[in-house]
Amino acid sequence: MSIDDYLAGLAGPLREIGEKLTPVIAAAVPRATGAVWHGHPVWSLGDRPGQRPVCFFKAHGSYVTFGLWRGQEITDPSGRLVPAARAMAVVKLRAVADIDPALFTDWMCAAAELEEA
C-alpha cells in the first residue's frame, strides 16, 4: 500500500488533513522517505521503512494523530505536542486548520536532526 492509497481510503475530513500534511512533511524533511509502515504513513531517514523514523500520521475515527518519534526531545514553545509512548510526542488534528506548516516544519527539522546526530 502506498501513502496515496492510504489517503484514498480515508473519509473526507481525515483525507483532507492527510492531503494537507503530506506535502508539509515532504518539504520539511525532503531527505526522508515516506512509506506505509505498520498500517500508516511514516517518514524515515534510513534505507528501509521505519529505519531512523522521524514522523508519522495515523487516522482515527474523528481526528488524525501527527507524531514525532523523538518528539519529547525537541523544544515545543507552542505547548501543542503531547508526550506519548517511549520518546514520542503527538498532536491531534481535527481539521485542516489545525496544521501550522511553519510550526510543524520546525518540529520535523528538529526531530530529523536528532536522527542524524
Image (cartoon, rainbow, N blue to C red):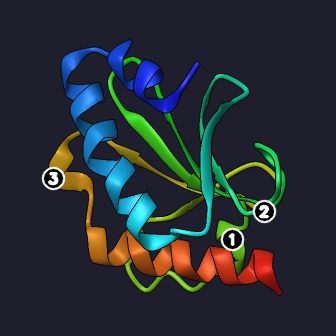
Q: Residue at x 84, y 53 (%)?
A: 51
Task: Give the residue pinned by disc 2.
Answer: 87
Task: Give the residue pinned by disc 1.
Answer: 72
In the rendered view, does 16 fall on the left or right side of 9?
left
Q: CA distance from mark 3 to mark 1?
A: 24 Å
Q: Earlier in the sequence, mark 3 or mark 2?
A: 2
In the rendered view, does 117 fall on the left or right side of 15?
right
**Image quadrant in which the C terminus is located:** bottom right
Q: Nearer the viewer, residue 74 or 111?
A: 111
Give the number of the disc on residue 33.
none
Q: CA distance from mark 1 to mark 2?
A: 5 Å
Q: Are marks 3 and 1 in contact (CB under 8 Å)?
A: no
- Disc 1 marks which amino acid? Gln
Q: Position of residue 23 (x, y in %)?
A: 33, 55
Q: Are marks 1 and 2 in contact (CB under 8 Å)?
A: yes
Q: CA distance from mark 3 to mark 2?
A: 26 Å
Q: Secondary structure at mark 1?
A: helix
Q: Are marks 3 and 2 in contact (CB under 8 Å)?
A: no
Q: Earlier in the sequence, mark 3 or mark 1?
A: 1
- Disc 2 marks which amino acid? Ala
Q: Secondary structure at mark 2?
A: loop
Give the number of the disc on residue 97.
3
Q: Residues within 10 Å of mark 3 (few under 14, many from 20)?
A: few
Q: Residue at x 59, y 82 (%)?
A: 110
* Vertical order, 24 against 42 (above or below): below
**Circle nearer the viewer, 3 or 1:** 3
Q: Position of residue 91 (x, y in %)?
A: 46, 53
Q: Residue at x 38, y 25 (%)?
A: 7
In the rendered view, does 42 fall on the left or right side of 53?
left
Q: Position of residue 67 (x, y in %)?
A: 56, 53
* Vertical order, 95 against 71 (above or below): above
